[in-house]
Amino acid sequence: MAQNQTNNGLVYYNVIQGKDVFDFTQKVHEIPRQCLLGLIALASLEVGLVLQWQAASWGLPLILINEKHLIHSSSQNMLDFSLDCRLLNQAFVSLAREQRWHTLHLIHDDSFDCLCLQDLFYRLSLSRISTNTISVTENTNPTVVLTLIKRKKTSETVYIIADREQTLRILSEAVSMEMLNPQYRWVLYMDPNTLQNSTIPGALHQGFLLILFNDLQSKNYSILESTNLQSYFTSINAINVYSTWTESGVFEEVARYTKDKGLLMFDGRLYKNGFRNFGNRLLRVVSVVSAPYTMRTITKEGKPYYYGFCYDILDDFAKTFKFRYESVDSVDGLYGNPTEDGLNATGMVGMVMRGEVDIGVAPFAQTTKRDRIIDYVLPFEEDGMGILMKSTENKMQKIFQIFRPLSPSSWLAIAIAALITSLALYLVTKLNPKLRKRDSSLRRSFWVVIGTFFGQDDGIRPKFPSGKVILGLWWIFTIVITALYTANLVAFLTVSLATTPIKNLEELASQTVYKPLVVQETNHHAMFKDAKGGLYSRIREKMSDMPKINTVEEGYKLVETGRYALLWDYSQFLYLINTECSSLEIAQESISKITLSFIVPKNAPYKEAFNYHMMKMLENGVLSKYRSKWWKKNQCARESKTTILEIDQISGIFVVYAVVLCFVIIIFAFEIFYAGRIQRKRNRNYREENIEMRNNISVSGEQNTFTDIHVQNVSR
């Protein structure tokens, strides 16, 4: 055994070379125990656990140092100076939250312990970050692994935590596959000095790459030097973050993570080679007129000047990223699409692709064809395709508009109520014993009810209680119905009777009056042009003889003729209808939802910065404020906000009327009963008086007969 001595006079032995657990145990057992003050093991955790038992039996402390990522296993007699993978996981998840990553690809080998992997998944799930895990070995082909990631063709985050050789193999293949570009975010765990001394550091600085490491393995500590122990303990509890840096060509430390303070970024950003601002540079911006997104005027110098919703966003970008801009028109007035061979493009898309301008500012719809040659900024809005037509008016509705405040069922209910009231008034009049028969007439009762409804009265009203209640209730019913009708009639006489002839795309394909119309070289034009069957192909067949238009303004003029239906962005139609008060109408349904955004050259260094700022504008409500500025409330009052009064809306008065009418019937029945009782009593008294009278007459008659006979006898 080799004996060594530190500057402080402490003697230590270089005991073991190798990884065999039993070999460790045997050699440690051979050391004279009277010379030992403690054990320091630069070994695996398995060896450390055996040595821990052996050191405990001797009453000696054990210090374990291991490069493998493990969960700490320190105990009373053992200090584990290995890097605790939980600290590494915390540091990475903090980075992911800071960068707002929602998905990532994790490439790892067996150097990352299964318990560490489980801990990482748990922390990522708490942050709602989905993970695609790829386990690699020495025999894994890195081309296959990276192909799985590259085929997604979206912005991806790749986290590699493997041994040095495996990590370098994957990075070398990524360089050859041109994956070191702004589309990918790379995070590694390895010594930045090792990476800097490799054969690929120059290529790495072209991409966005972060390196996680700690001072335990980046600096050469003499663990037995007492002066270094404090620094050692400090470094083992910190994760340093390094970034690629194009100016210096080295990896620069940009942040540090500790358990106590969390993630601390030194200058507010992680990627040193990432875009920051333009430094007051003048940018060229291309646009076409698409009100209210982009609207055009001419300056005094004769140059085009654009303004609108999109330029409000651009002005916010210019203030944040410190640039000036000048607006130019599209070379052919079109949005543009790629050519068949994909080597060029028309319109604004072609200008951005060729680098003639820096930004395309307009409501560009995202399509797969355009995405092959240019990049999109994060969408600022989702929109659908609308159908714009010239509205028509119903002449018959205009003639009979005074009847429209109430629905047909409401009018029928009022007529039935009038008939029932007339019949009820007639019956209580006819059956009332106090009235003469000539006072009861169904025709008379009906005209009393109708006259009351229209505010006309001949002065003849029922004198008995039940008739008064019926007529009084009818007055209340009349007042309520008249008030509702009058209030709704005012609204119906002041709104337009214009109707939309087509409600959806299916109706457009099935009719022959309107011909569909689209603007050339737009996403709508490409959608119908490339349709292979179904509804879209039916619309394309109807476009065979349509006029070719390059701007939406040309389409508006053709729609005014009443023979065409324009297919375009719904939001732009809504702006037109709300501001210009024209005779145009939008179909009720919008179709083919799309996202709208700006376009920039492929792999533009400022794309990710623009995306992040657009996201902040969405979250902070800035875009909503700009939208409310341009899409104000309807200034033309074209759409009727009135509704026809249905029977269920006025049914309350009918219910009240029916309840009171039932009450009237009860009153009338009581009135008949009471009147009958009085009449029967009168009849009984009358009969008794008649009998008494007849008796009196009979007695007086006998007396008169006797007197006559006596007089005769005397005269004789």
Image (cartoon, grey):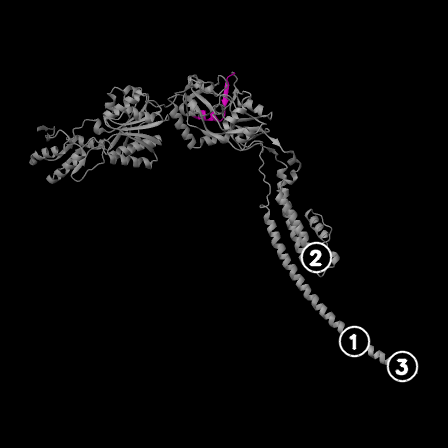
As drawn, the label of residue 455 is none
Q: Quadrant of residue 239?
A: top left
At 42% from the left edge and 32% from the top edge, which residue is drawn? 619
Q: Are marks 3 and 1 in contact (CB under 8 Å)?
A: no
Q: Quadrant of residue 496?
A: top right
Circle 1: element type: helix
Q: Is residue 186 magenta?
A: no
N-terminal label among 1 and 2: 2
Residue 644 lies, with reference to residue 691, above or below; the image says above
As measured in the structure, the alpha-carbon distance from the residue carrying label 3 to the one carrying label 1 is 23 Å
In the image shown, does 353 or 487 lie closer to the viewer?
353
Expressed as whole percent of the image width and height from the top left, the position of residue 258 reads 27, 33
Circle 3: element type: helix
Q: Residues within 10 Å of mark 3 (few under 14, many from 20)?
A: few
In this view of the protein, can residue 345 be seen by the observer?
yes
N-terminal label among 2 and 3: 2
| Residue type beneath disc 3 | Val
Q: Which residue is mark 3?
A: 711
Judge left or right: residue 334 versus residue 214.
right
| Residue type beneath disc 1 | Asn
N-terminal label among 3 and 1: 1
As measured in the structure, the alpha-carbon distance from the residue carrying label 2 to the one carrying label 3 is 60 Å
User: Which range is magenta?
Assistant: 302-316
Q: Which residue is mark 1?
A: 696
Q: Quadrant of residue 124?
A: top left
Circle 2: element type: helix
As drawn, the label of residue 429 is 2
In the image shown, does 294 or 157 lie closer to the viewer?
157
Judge left or right: residue 10 versus residue 213.
left
Expressed as whole percent of the image width and height from the top left, the position of residue 43 reads 16, 32
Q: Is residue 315 magenta?
A: yes
As measured in the structure, the alpha-carbon distance from the residue carrying label 1 to the one carrying label 2 is 40 Å
